[in-house]
Image (spheres, rainbow, N blue to C red):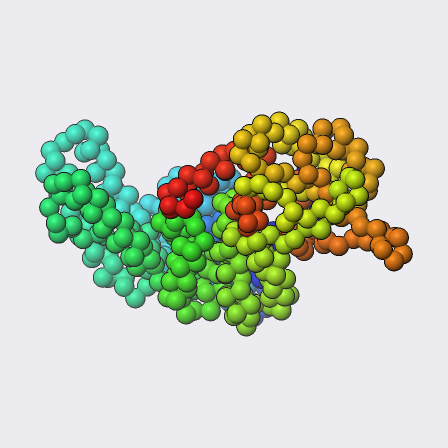
Amino acid sequence: MKVFFLATSLILCGFASIAQVKKTNNSTSSSIGFSIKGKINGIGNSELYLAHYFGSTQQVIKDTAQADAQGNFVFQGKDELPKGLYLISFSKNRYLDVIIGNTNFSFETDTLDPINHMKFQNSAENEAFFGFQREMGKRYVELRKLEMEKKDPVQIASIRKEIIQYQQSWFEKNKLLFVSKLVRATFEPEIPPFKKKVSTPKDSTEFYQYQFSYYKKHFFDNLDLNDERFIRTPFLQKKIEKYFEDLVVQQPDSIIKDADLLMSKIKNKEVRRYVIYKIASTYETSNIVGTDAAFAHMGEKYYVGEASLWDTTTVRQMRDRIKVLKPLLIGKRIPELLLTDPSGKRLTTASIPGEYTLVYFYDPECSHCKEETPKLMAQANYFKSKKISVLATSIARNKKQWTDFIKEYKMESIYNGIDIHPSAKSGKEEYYTDFLRTFDIYSTPIIYILDKNKRIIGKKIPTDKIQDFISFYENRQKELGIK
């Protein structure tokens, strides 16, 4: 594939300074922002690092420490640590999750059973956190044993009831601590019983619709969307991803509606920035046709429209990106192509007949184009049966390479064009089209599929998926009653 421009991840620059992995030097200053003393028996003379989560896929290193022969170490620095869920990595693929609220505490444990042997001093958050893990771990071991042994269902139900009672008591006892919010965020919304008796297929449909609707509406109830500490946990990212992957119809209107509804609930500036970034980045790079309209919406409404949240470079780049994308969204009439065909005559998109038009942008020197073009031409009979006209457009302005490419790949049966035009005044060659800015051609080959009115119905479709896409499109039109 020949790549001309890196068109993805523009919005990431708004978070670049936050999400970078960085190391905070230990401070010898008398001003201490954090001091975490630890002892892990069994890790003598090892290096450890302290990092906070940034969503579920990144960690930001804040400090490193060297354990002595007895496993003693200190994380220490003059700057305050941002609050949230951290991890302490103490050996290969082994780590402890700890909550950073109070930044001056100590703990001791060992490598044999870090959770059950953990003891904290001066950290109510972590005492409650590890106490919950110990108690729940013990109770679930007991429950799983009974279930595997297929013991008395009444006994199993009793254990389950005890677990619920313990959780309720624990939440009440620790309701003022962040750990209470953190644990609650892992719970799914509880769906109330369906009030109607299910006795017919129609009742079943209503039952499942009720469950889905309630679950979706209350999906974020257990997560405080205005507590920025959740940015530094895995749970906010996982919730957003699950919501948009599993509960939102992957069509632009649905994505936009649900994104706006979610954003209406978020007032905290940092959480707002993070959620905007997550949704926009998802649909900037999505492989689902048409969802870039959701990206354009997020960019226009929440980047350009809320410019104070971002740096000026991010806003400018987003504005430029939207300017390219909006005319190319599904349903838009494709910008007119003004080309010259091999005989020297003018060739335009509008002049090409057919129920569909397939615009194939390529570069004669592109190795991937040389692989894909034979696959395109092998579908000639299919194109004819569906009244699909193919317009192959060279984005490189070299006549010999262009004509040689047409001859080598036997493309004479389709429409061929190049952006070279002799000037009527000077006789010199003129170029009309900025392929990057007008058609978002940052790599080749790229395919646009148009309906008979030259409106975009598909774009960036792989060559071997053209027929599948046409079938999907026609079936969808039938479902909607559109001829």
Quarter in which the N terminus is drawn? top right
Which residue, as the protein is rendered here, is positioned at the far right?
A: 426
Estimate the x, y position of residue 343 in percent, counting from the top left.
79, 40
Q: Position of residue 303 (x, y in %)?
A: 54, 65
Q: Tally the marks.
A: 0
The reply to whether residue 13 is visible in this rendering is no
User: Which residue is pictured at 19% across the width and 50% down the height?
Assistant: 164
Relative to the observer, which residue lies in front, 255 or 453? 453
Q: Quadrant of the C terminus?
A: top left
407 sits to left or right of 163: right
Q: Nearer the viewer, residue 414 or 175?
A: 414
Residue 256, can we see it? yes
Q: Residue at x 22, y 44 (%)?
A: 205
Could you tell me which residue is drawn at 31 percent across and 53 percent down?
216
Compared to residue 451, the image places residue 19 above or below, namely: below
Q: Which residue is painted at 13% across and 43% down in the image?
A: 198
Judging depth in this view, the residue of 138 and 261 nearest the camera is 261
Q: Residue 304: percent from the left, percent from the top?
A: 56, 67
| Residue 352 placement, left or right of 215 | right
Q: From what the image shows, is residue 385 above or below residue 349?
A: above
Q: Is 354 placed above or below 165 here? A: above
